[in-house]
Image: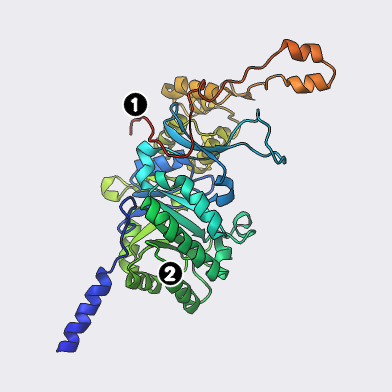
Amino acid sequence: MSWFRRAIRGIMASELKKVPIPRNGVDYRGKLVLAPMVRSGELPSRLTALHYGADLVWGPETVDRSLIGTTRRFNPETKTIDWTRKPSQGAKTPPADVKDSLIYRIYPEKEGRKLIFQIGTSNPDFAVQAARLVAGDVAGIDVNAGCPKPFSTHDGMGAALLRTPDKLCSILEALVQNIVPEFEIGISVKIRILETAEETEALVRRLVATGITGLTVHCRTTPMRPRERAIRGQLRMIANVCREAGVACLMNGDVETRDQALELIQEYGVDGAMIATAAEKNPSCFRSKADGGLLPWNVVVEQYIRYAMEVENKFGNTKFLLCQLIPGKQPAYRHISGCKSYTKVCELLGFEHLVERAREVDFALDIDPDNTGKKSKKVNNSALAAGGNMAESRSKPQVKKSLSDRGVETQTGTHAEPQPAEAVAISA
């Protein structure tokens, strides 16, 4: 019976094998997480998902070159860390007086150790440069190798990497070799299945050998769209390959609730699950039935608006998310598109107790709370002068406040910890 004992020991060893999780990283095993989604994965969406029980949240894909060259700042007004840069506007040297563009924003007090930064990249060097800028503030770096949309694939990123496995592996290896020792967080990758199980298995075996700690598989091929049912025929094989290598495996595709996710995890032997579309429509899907399950849309919308105002989220993004959260048959859905301010949104939805705060946020974002949109732009002195109105331009000097005058601390080089501040109270 010695062969039997050896076989049992081999099975136990394979089950217990695990790639070490770095000290500042996080193990994906046993986690139900929010998927990376453009527009739907911005800060207030992530905070709402965590509020309703998500174990981890992925930020939206951020392209490496858009992050390289940014300045990291702590904003005491919103208690967030912002990565900003001057928009080029087609010029080699951006104008000094142009407003900074916000590239990425996190709320370290509420999501820092539960946030995975997803990077869009097709170049190992750029990937490392970009990752270094955020690695000290997040729990992990995830490489996007699954997005099928042209804005990602046109430059060899996203799902295009599935067809260039040498490049994908070199990116992961560069991140593992450079980011893991310096910041002690894990590196992971998100992929889609290929046309055949043999192709997928060959790819996954290469990926898990790069030193990554986690792999998420979207159970659709690149040409498939969300309306097409996920294909789970390859899932158990992928989970087994990951388990043999000691890499955590998450599944994605048509996962809709916590309870369903637990059933799928047991059925296919994966380590966790990722929710996308269902969380975009109602992030209370992260609650189990035992904890009450899905909440009414208006309860979720109020919570989302509270977070959006707390972090002074761009109003355009907030309105987009409200159109996902409010059911299309509701009267509010038809009227929300006409709102141009947080104040009008709160009034329309009957959140009178939030109107005062909404007006404050509107003014902070330079929005007219009475629904006429952006406030009138300041007089452009240069344009006046160019048009021959030199006297008028001189009579209307513009004084631009410095960052320090506006209470924004610029941090370059080292990443100083944000100063603790009292958070805005948010009820459930």
Cα separation, mark 1 vs mark 2, equals 46 Å
Q: Quadrant where the C terminus lies?
A: top left
The one of 52 and 145 positioned closer to us in this rendering: 145
Q: Is residue 139 left or right of residue 14?
A: right
The numbered disc on residue 21 is none
The one of 381 and 257 positioned closer to us in this rendering: 381
Residue 352 in the image: above or below residue 306? above
The one of 176 and 234 positioned closer to us in this rendering: 176
- Binning the other alpha carbons within 10 Å of mark 1 as few (below 14), some (14 to 19) or many (20 upward) gives few
Residue at point 51%, 43% (across, down) = 324
The amino acid type found where label 1 is placed reads: Glu
For disc 1, the marked residue is 422
Residue 371 in the image: above or below residue 5? above
Circle 2 — which element? loop
Where residue 47 sits: x, y (%)?
Answer: 40, 40
Where residue 224 sits: x, y (%)?
Answer: 56, 64
Residue 120 in the image: above or below residue 310? below
Q: Is residue 333 visible?
A: no
Residue at point 34%, 57% (across, down) = 28
Q: Nearer the viewer, mark 1 or mark 2?
A: 1
Counting residues from the start of the chain, the first of labels 1 and 2 encountered is: 2
The numbered disc on residue 232 is 2
Q: Is residue 365 left or right of residue 25?
A: right
Q: Quadrant where the N terminus lies?
A: bottom left
User: In which image quadrant can residue 249 be found?
Assistant: bottom left
